[in-house]
């Protein structure tokens, strides 16, 4: 296993188009997170899954954003009707949730989205 | 939400010096994690310290945790130019599962 992988690494899209990103977590990890990061800021939490269940979603996440993890393995993040303000790095992370807490989260390299 | 707040925002030192970064948080935690991020790249996990631990070492890194003060510190000893990066702490709440990040400390190590 080579860690968390994200695809694509870069995406340029026109305003109003839909985009979809994919994240493949570390295979034995049951927890998967999505974050967004803009220049000079820390990662901003978007949502997370435990297995296939989406357990928490940020209130900052508009209805244009949707995430899925249909079989509890890979996840997709879709942004509909993109806006210039959606331009950011989208980061995925995974960890192993245990009864007493969870292990460290490992991050992918991110997908850089530019909306023109 | 539980968010780690790093201090200072920026730190510039000479190679060979030690760098200390601090993190404060607000509520009860299961653990606290430190990450490094090079410009334009993903986050790299450095160290996890559990709420019942007070100190942890990993190579040139030393992390302390004081749950009574709700604070943590990351010490990098004998710094190198390659340590130049942003450093983030992420407390993990006892009641939830999200990791929440602050703005980070931008460390610059001058050769």
Image (cartoon, rainbow, N blue to C red):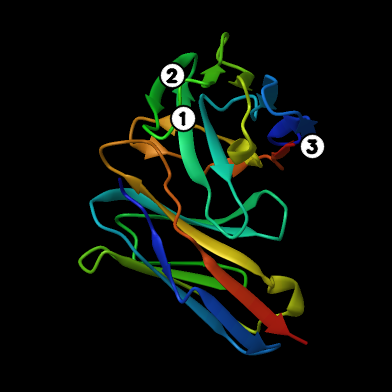
Q: Seen in the image, is B41 located left or right of residue B91?
A: right
Question: Residue B106's spot in the image, x, y percent?
Answer: 59, 71
Query: Of tags 2 and 3, which is closer to the observer?
Result: 3
Local SS, label 3: strand
Instruction: Please give the residue where the numbered disc 1 appears in the rendered image.
Output: A47
Residue A54, how many percent across, how many down? 43, 19
- Residue drawn 69% across the image and 72% down it: B83
Residues at marks 2 and 3, CA–CA distance in whole angstroms: 25 Å
Per the image, the residue denoted by label 2 is A54
| Between discs 2 and 1, the one toward the N terminus | 1
User: What residue sits right under mark 3 in the picture?
Assistant: A10
Please tell me which of labels 1 and 3 falls first in the chain: 3
Question: Residue B12: which disc?
Answer: none
From this viewpoint, which residue is outermost toward the top? A71
In percent of the image, x 20 and y 66: which residue is there? B68
Q: Residues within 10 Å of mark 2 (few under 14, many from 20)?
A: some
């Amino acid at each position: 296993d080579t860690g968390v992988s994200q695809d694509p690494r870069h995406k340029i899209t026109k305003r109003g188009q839909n985009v979809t990103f994919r994240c493949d977590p570390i295979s034995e990890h049951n927890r998967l997170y999505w974050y967004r990061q803009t220049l000079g800021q820390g990662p901003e939490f978007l949502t997370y899954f435990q297995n296939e269940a989406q357990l928490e979603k940020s209130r900052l996440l508009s209805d244009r954003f949707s995430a899925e993890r249909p079989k509890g393995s890979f996840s997709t993040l879709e942004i509909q009707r993109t806006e210039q303000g959606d331009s950011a790095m989208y980061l995925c992370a995974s960890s192993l949730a245990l009864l007493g807490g969870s292990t460290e989260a490992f991050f992918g390299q991110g997908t850089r989205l530019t909306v023109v | 939400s539980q968010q780690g707040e790093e201090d200072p925002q920026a730190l510039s030192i000479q190679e060979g010096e030690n760098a200390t970064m601090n993190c404060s948080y607000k509520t009860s935690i299961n653990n606290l994690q430190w990450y490094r991020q090079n410009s334009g790249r993903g986050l790299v996990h450095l160290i996890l310290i559990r709420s019942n631990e007070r100190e942890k070492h990993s190579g040139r890194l030393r992390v302390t945790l004081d749950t009574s003060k709700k604070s943590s510190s990351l010490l990098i000893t004998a710094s190198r130019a390659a340590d130049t990066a942003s450093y983030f702490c992420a407390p993990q709440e006892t009641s939830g599962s999200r990791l929440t990040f602050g703005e980070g400390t931008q460390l610059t190590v001058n050769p």
